[in-house]
Amino acid sequence: MPLESNSLRYAAHLPLAGIGAQGQARIRAAHIALIGVGGIGCAAAQYIVSSGVGELTLCDFDHVAESNLSRQILYKVADLGRAKVSVAAESLRALNPETKINSRAGRMADSDMQTLFPDCDFIIDASDNYGTRLAVNRTALSLGIPWLMAACIRLEAQLLLLRPDLPGQPCYRCAYGTAPETLEDCPGAGIFAPVAGIAGAAAAYFALACLAGQSVAQGLHLFDATHWAWQSLQINRNPGCRDCGH
């Protein structure tokens, strides 16, 4: 999809080294899949759409609940009980009508990912399910599509950029190995609302910068809001990994 004539919307990107008109055109031509439209996904989607991505596909099985409203900023009291992807799509279309918004209601299985991902240039996994992340990992590996895992809990966030489109790179299983199918969730462990926003904005940065052609820091990035500190860890490929090892 070409860059639209309404370039004033993205004028602030054009003077930036590493983005400019060429990078903005690449963003405009891109299709991102976003799995999970919760606290992280809502924030990420807003920056992705407002920055002019050509197409965004939202994937989520859940419905808007009152406990979501403090941090899932695409939803309002009037949206309680509605499917998150439907409400989010409406809000995002109003934010930027130039972006094509698709929605998929339901849990994403391997077969769903194998159908959707070949048409995508980048994937963001903002789910809270280890099994879903492993399925994203397998499919992204098979297709060579870059993707980002983004998560937050309590006052902490984690982001892991993975580049199966480049040779010799680690995968999600290399970083996390074996973990329980069910991860801690926000209602149970708690989450400070702005931390979800910080993680979502960071996820949008990684996706858009990568699509624009910038050199983006790989590895695992950890945010500790209590001490206002970021830490980056290098992840090495595991030759014995059952997903990417040979």
Image: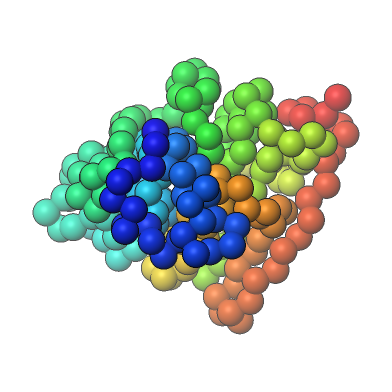
Q: Is residue 244 left or right of residue 68?
A: right
Q: Residue, x 52% and y 70% (percent of image)?
A: 155
Q: Is residue 67 left or right of residue 229?
A: left
Q: Is there any visible trace of residue 38 in the rendered image? A: no
Q: Residue, x 37% and y 57% (percent of image)?
A: 10
Picture layout, residue 230 above or below residue 170: below
Q: Quadrant of residue 56?
A: top left
Number of marks = 0
Picture layout, residue 8 above or below residue 210: below
Q: Is there any visible trace of residue 136 in the rendered image? A: yes
Q: Quadrant of residue 3?
A: top left
Q: Nearer the viewer, residue 93 or 200?
A: 93
Quadrant where the N terminus is found in the figure: top left
Q: Residue, x 31% and y 33% (percent of image)?
A: 102
Q: Residue furthest left?
A: 78
Colour approach in the figure = rainbow
Q: Residue furthest bottom?
A: 227
Q: Position of residue 48 (x, y in %)?
A: 41, 51
Picture layout, residue 109 above or below residue 79: above
Q: Quadrant of residue 162?
A: top right
Q: Nearer the viewer, residue 192 or 180?
A: 192
Quadrant where the C terminus is found in the figure: top right
Q: Nearer the viewer, residue 193 or 237?
A: 237
Q: Position of residue 239 (x, y in %)?
A: 88, 34
Q: Is residue 74 left or right of residue 118?
A: left
Q: Residue, x 28% and y 43% (percent of image)?
A: 98
Q: Position of residue 29 (x, y in %)?
A: 44, 37
